[in-house]
Amino acid sequence: MKKIGIFLGFQPGSNLTTEGIGRLLAFILKESKKDSITIFCPKWLRYSVEKLFEDNKISLDRFEIVSTQNVPFGVKVKNYLKERRTPKVQFSKISHLVNKLKRKFIDFVRNIISNFFSTTSVWLLLIKTILLVVSSVVLSPILVLSGIIWFIFSFLSFIGRRIRKTTPVNRIAKKLKQSIDIIKGSVYQLVIDNELNRVVGIINRRKDIRVCFIPSMIWPQIVNLNCKKVLAAPDIVFYDFPTQFIGVGEVHDRIRKSIAVADHLICYSEQVKNDHLVNKCGVDPSKVTVIKHANIDMYEHIKVSKSLQRYYSEKQNAKQIINRYVTSTLSTGHVLYNVDIENLDYVIYSSQFRPHKNIPNLIKSIRILNIDLQTNIKLIVTGDFRFDRELVDFCRDNHLDNDIFIISNMSSELLAAFNCFAKVAVNPTLFEGGFPFTFSEAYSVGTPSVMSSIPAVIEEIEDVQLQRKMLFDPYDPYSIATKIEWAFQNSEELFFCQSSLYQKFSKRNWEQVASEYNKVFNKLM
C-alpha cells in the first residue's frame, strides 16, 4: 500500500501546539480523508507530536508515528545544562516585588508631604512637625545604615565592573568563552543533524513511503530521501528583514539546499510564490502550488453541549477555563489572580517571540495608550520576551509590569477562552506568508481584530473602507495605539464590518485544504 510520510525535525524542546507550522499540520491531518499517513520524527519530538494530537482532538490511533529509539546523549547533556542555568523566571517576580515596594515607599513619602502641607490648623501643623522630627530621630540610624550598605554595595559593584572591563585576562577569558560557545553550538547542531539523518534512514527503509511532506525548509537532510519530496515554503522572511536575524547565512544555505531537491513546493500566498520562490530563488513557477488557509474556528473549544445551554453559556465556560488556569498556574500576587476577566479591558496577541513579529512596537503602543492617551488597556501576549533584557527594562522603566502579561504555551482551549473575553485581537507583524491565523481565532469567538497593513493582509481585504478601519502601520507605535483605541471605542461596529471578511474565509474549510494537499501528493505517487 502506497503511503505518505511527514518528516518532522524540530529542535529539542519545541512545543508544536504553539508553533504555527505544528497547528497548521494538525488542522490538515484532522480533516484529511487519508489515513495512510505516517509521521517520522526524532525521539525528542514524539511527546510534542502526541500533545499536538491531544490538543486538537486527533486520535493517536489514526496515524502511525515512527521515531528514533533514543534521545542522543549530547541532547540530554544540553537539556540538563539548560535546566540548571535557565532562571526559573523568579527574577521577574523579584523585580516586580522590588518595584512594588519602591512605589509603595514613594507613595507613602508623597502622602506624608502632601498631608503636611495640606494642614490648615497651626496647632495641628505643630503636632505634625514634632511627630516628623521624632520619627526622623528614631529612624535615622536605620536610614543611615541602609544608605551606607547601599553605597558600599554600589561602590563594590562599580569597581567589579571596571576590573572586568580593564583586565586583559578577563578579555582573553571572554574571547575564549565566545570561541567555546561557537564550538559547542556547532557540535550540538551536528548532533541534531546526525539524528535527522537517522530519521531519513528510517524513511528510506520503508518501501511503502512514496511521497514525503516536509513542513519546514530548514532540514537539508531531506536531500538523502529516496522518495518524492513535497516541501512547505511558508516564507523566507529574512529576504525582507535581513538585519533582524542572527546566522542568516547558514539558515539561507540550508533553505536553498532543501529547495534545490524538492520535487514540489507548497506556499500560502501569491506574494511568497512570486517574490521569494520564483524571483529570488529561481524556482520554476509550475513547481509551486499556492494553498491558502481556511478559517480557524476556536468556538469548538468553548462550546457547551445542547443539554447544558439552558443553564450554562459559552462565556461562562470560557471564564471557567481561564479561572482554572489562573488558580492552578499563577501566584496569588499576580494581577490576573484577583481580577474578574469580564471586567478587564485587554487586547491579545497570539504569536511566537521572533524579530518580525514586532512585539517591541506593540509594547510601545501600550505605553502610548496608558501614559500619553490616559487609557487603561492591558495586553496579553503568548510570545515570551522575558529573556530580552531591553524589552524587560523598557516595561519596568515605563511602569508597564501591571499592564502586560505573558502567558506562553497556551492550549487551544485556553487561547479560545482568552480570545473570547478580549475586547480586540491585535497583530502587529511585519511579515506573514499568508493571512494571519489571529483574525479567525478571535472572530470565531466574538472578538474583532486590528492588524498590520502588509501585503499578505491587503491581498485578502478588497474593501478599502474596511482596510482603513482595521489596518495600521506596524512601524509606527502611535498608529498601532490609535487603531487599538478606536477599536475599543467601536468594537461592535468593527465586528459587524469584518463579518464579510470572515464569511469569505469560511467558504474554505480545512477539509478542502487537506484535499488540495492530497492532490499535490497524489500527482507524485
Image (cartoon, rainbow, N blue to C red):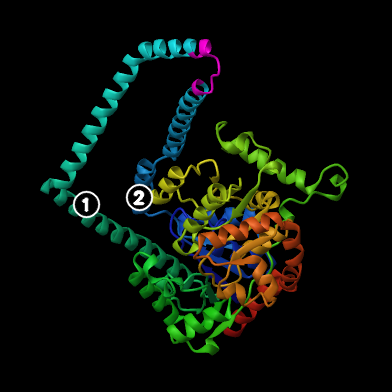
Identify which residue is drawn at 30% across, 24% down: 147
Instruction: Tell me residue 239's x, y (percent).
Output: 42, 75
| In this picture, residue 288 sits left or right of residue 324 | left
Magenta includes 401?
Answer: no
Residue 256 to residue 309: above or below: below
SS at circle 1: helix
392, 490: nearer the viewer = 490
Residue count near mark 1 (Cα–Cα under 10 Å), binned few <14, some 14–19, many ≥20: few
Callout 2 touching callout 1 (CB < 8 Å): no
Whichever of labels 2 and 1 marks the residue nearer the N terminus, that label is 2
Q: What kind of secondary structure does the magenta stretch mostly adopt? A: helix
Instruction: Tell me residue 392's x, y (percent).
Output: 43, 47
Identify which residue is drawn at 39% across, 41% down: 87
What range is drawn magenta here? 116-125
What residue is disc 1 on? 177
Quadrant of residue 130 within the rendered picture? top left
Does residue 58 appear in this view? no
Q: Quadrant of the N terminus?
A: bottom right
Q: Identity of the amino acid at label 1?
A: Lys
Q: Quadrant of the C terminus?
A: bottom right
What residue is disc 2 on? 78
Q: Which label belongs to residue 443? A: none
Quadrant of residue 57 within the rendered picture? bottom right
Magenta includes 120?
Answer: yes
Determine the CA span between mark 2 and mark 1: 17 Å
Instruction: Tell me residue 320's x, y (percent).
Output: 71, 41
